[in-house]
Structure formats: structure tokens, C-alpha cells
Amino acid sequence: MDEQQIRAELREWILAHAKSKPSGELTDQTAILETGLLSSLDIVEFVLFIEELRGDEVDTDDIEPEVFTSIDTLWEGFFGQAAG
Amino acid sequence: METASQLAVRLTKQSRDQFWNVYTEFDWPDSLDADRYAMTPELISIHGTELWESLDEPTRKRLSLYEVGNFFSLTLQGERPLVAGLSDRLYSKRLTHEGTEYIHHFIDEENKHMIMFGLFLQKYLGKVYPEKKIALDRTYAKGEEEVAFFCKVMVVEELGDYYNVKMMLDDAIEPIVKQINWVHHRDESRHLGFGRRHLTELTEQWMPTWSDETRAGFSDWLGQYIKSSWNDFYNPTMYKDAGLEDPYQVRKMALAHPLTAEHRARASKKLVNIFLRLGLLLEAPVL
């Protein structure tokens, strides 16, 4: 799965689980938690979805909450070159 | 009716009378018997599903070890913030003097449970399953955080106790697992009694000051919290460790299966009824 497909999958999951509709388009820079699209209780499900996409487990001890800021930070934190 | 402080005096005496040593309480066998179930089959997360029916007996028994390992792990992981939160309340205005006395025992017993679960997990699984939760800051109405904390305590303890009671009465499972469940239940029955009384008093104190919007928001959060606590019972890593294929699909299948939904509703009934009666839940959540 290439980067664009992964970003699209992340976007689709967020929209499917969003507590409210985003005020505008959901871009890769939209603040996911700050705007209330997802809550802390969604994080476990979201992490498991990310594991499935990565094909590898996520160690949340190594993750800072900031990684959940936007699709850009999710890509960098979980799938980009810096991801462990 | 007995107040939380009066109850705390009685429970403190019981804790002192039953004081136990986690390092001498158990005779740990060198290994577990692969021919026995490590967990009561009816409590296994995929029990009753088509997948369960398709598994042979050795695979079911292997899965039971990882299932009980996941159950002990999520209980241990739930007890960590509980102990942190209780410690934070010692000698503060949030507890009476009698409450503080009892919370010392509550913390001591929870610490011993974490040691007990940790010893089991390291010895027979070689690991503790990590939790995937990440704490995020949120804003609260006055008293809301305090009520939410004791709701979380009750969720981890009531759901765990449902499993403890089933397994402590099951002679067919591994004796060490049966004993751990019994020891846990013995202490938890006191913690649950105190938690219910204390949460009732907190709710009576704070909820009348909340707006309708806060009350609705709290009910929504609490329903989601119970649901997310249940989701932890369906751990893909546990399925993978037991040798099941497509562990993430197993999780989705198990969570969506009507028989497991019935199990969750049955096991949560007491907990949900307490929250409904207190008005903390406005309606029963779909679990």
C-alpha cells in the first residue's frame, strides 16, 4: 500500500468514526482531536487499525500524543521514515 | 443508610484481619498443564462463534492461556492508574479521615494484585500485554473528574469481578488461575462495596450542579468508556500468540457476533444498572 492509499484509509476511518461532521473538508492538516472529530476513547481502536495497516504492532510507550494531531503527523509517526 | 466513612471503618478492620503476603500466598507450579483450560471456556472471547466451533481441543486450550493472560494484563493495566489516582487523594479534602485509612488498604491490595498478575504473566507467558490507551487532556465541569475517576474504578473492578467469580468456582481450570481469581475477588468485594457507596455520595453532591448538557455529555462518555473497556478483551496480539490466523479479522468477527454481544450485556448488567440508577447513564449503552 503506498503513501496516498494509507492517507486515504486513515481519512476514511476518521470520517467513519467522527463524533461530528468536520466543518470543512478533512485535509491532511486538519486537527483531529482538537476539533473533536475523535476522542481519547477512539484512540485504542484507531491504534489497532493503524497496526493492521502497518502489519506491525504499535508500542504506545514510544508514542507521544502529538502524533494524533493530523493525518500528516500520523503518517510521519507511524508510516514515515522516522516510524519505528 | 451507612455512609462511605462508616463503611470504610468496617472495611479497614476486615482488610487488617485478612492481611496477606503476596509472596507467600501462592505455590507457583513450574509450568501449566497443557491438557487443562487456563480460563473458563465460556469466558473466552470467541466462545460460541463459528470459529470457536471449528477449533480443535488443543488449540482451544492454548487460546485459553493467552485469553487469561490478556484478562490479567488488562486488569493489571487498569489498576495502575487506579492506584495513582487513589494515592493522589490520600490526606486530601476529597476523602474523609476514615476514607484515607481505608484507601491505604485499597492501594496496598491493588499493588499486591498487580504483583500477583505480573508474576503469573512473566512466569507463564513471558510478558504483560501492553495497553494501547493514550491519555489526552480534556476539560471537566466541577466535580466531573472526581465522579469520572470513581466510575472508571468501578468499570475495571465490576467487569473483572464477573470473570473472577466464574473462574474461582471452576474446578476444571488450572488451580493457580482459580486461586488468583479467588484472592482477587476476596479483596475486590470490599473495594466494590466502598466504591459504590463513595460514588453514590459523589454523584449526589455534584450531579445536581451540572447542566443538562454536562449530564448528557457525561452519560455519552461513560457509555463509550464501558464499550472501549470491553473492546480490550478482544486483543489481536492474544489471538496471534495463540496461533489464530488473521488476528485483526478475528477481533472484528468476535466483536460483531451476536453471542458475544449477549455475553457483554449479561456481564455488564449489574454495572450498567448501578450507573442508570444513579443517573450517570441516561440510557443503557449498546455494548
Image: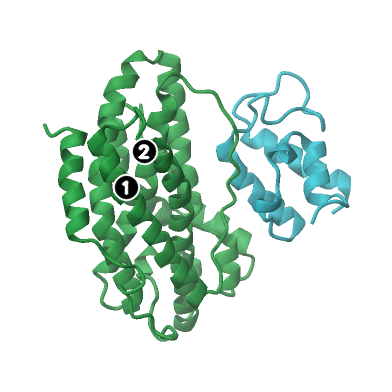
Chain colours: A cyan, B green
Q: Residues within 10 Å of mark 2 (few under 14, many from 20)?
A: some
Which amino acid type is marked by label 1? His
Indicate the chain on which mark 2 is placed.
B
- x 49%, y 77%: residue: B123
Q: Give the camera-side residue of B186 and A24.
A: B186
Q: What element does badge 1 sit on? A: helix
Residue that numbered label 1 is attached to: B104
Near-viewer residue (B145 or B177) = B145
Give me the residue at 31% from left, 65% from top: B181
Mark number, residue B202: none
Q: Amino acid at mark 2?
A: Leu
| Quarter of the rendering containing residue B76 | bottom left
Q: SS for tag 2?
A: loop
Residue at horizontal 41%, vertical 42%? B87
Label 1: chain letter: B
Q: CA distance from mark 2 to mark 1?
A: 8 Å
Q: Are marks 2 and 1 in contact (CB under 8 Å)?
A: yes
Pointer 2 residue: B90
How far across and how far down the image is residue B156, in percent? 39, 48
Q: Earlier in the sequence, mark 2 or mark 1?
A: 2
